[in-house]
Image (cartoon, grey):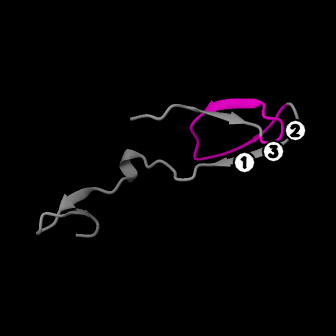
């Protein structure tokens, strides 16, 4: 499931600087010269970074690194 892109706007003059998804972004507004720093509240994990879940001896799912 992919999220729809977010509008990225200047915090000073509200000019639209772009749209998309980001984990961390620093951009200078060409209109007012304001520096804008954006950071995602919770970064999206890539498939290779997600923990692998396996069932333990009791049938509960656990992180495979914890087994």
Residue 53 in the image, given as x and y percentages of width and height: 25, 57
Distance between the alpha carbons at the discs numbered 1 and 3: 7 Å
Q: Which residue is mark 3?
A: 35
User: Which sits in the foreground, 3 or 46?
Assistant: 3
* Residue drawn at x 83%, y 36% as measured from the top left: 13
Magenta residue span: 11-30
- The secondary structure type at the circle numbered 1 is strand
Is residue 52 shown in magenta?
no
Residue 4 in the image, given as x and y percentages of width and height: 51, 31
- The secondary structure type at the circle numbered 2 is loop
User: Which sits in the foreground, 59 or 64?
Assistant: 59
Tell me the quarter of the image containing the N terminus. Answer: top left
Labelled disc at residue 37: 1
* Residue drawn at x 28%, y 56% as measured from the top left: 52
Labelled disc at residue 33: 2
Horizontally, residue 22 falls left or right of residue 33, namely left
- The secondary structure type at the circle numbered 3 is strand
Is residue 20 shown in magenta?
yes
Horizontally, residue 12 falls left or right of residue 58, namely right
Vertical side of 8 occupied by 57: above or below? below
* Residue drawn at x 52%, y 53% as measured from the top left: 42
Label 3, residues with CA under 10 Å away: few <14, some 14-19, many ≥20: few
């Amino acid at each position: 499931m992919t999220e729809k892109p977010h509008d990225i706007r200047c915090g000073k003059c509200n000019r639209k600087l772009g749209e998309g998804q980001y984990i961390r972004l620093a951009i200078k507004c060409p209109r007012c010269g304001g520096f804008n720093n954006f950071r995602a509240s919770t970064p999206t994990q890539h498939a290779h970074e997600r923990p692998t879940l396996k069932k333990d001896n009791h049938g509960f799912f656990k992180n495979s690194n914890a087994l």
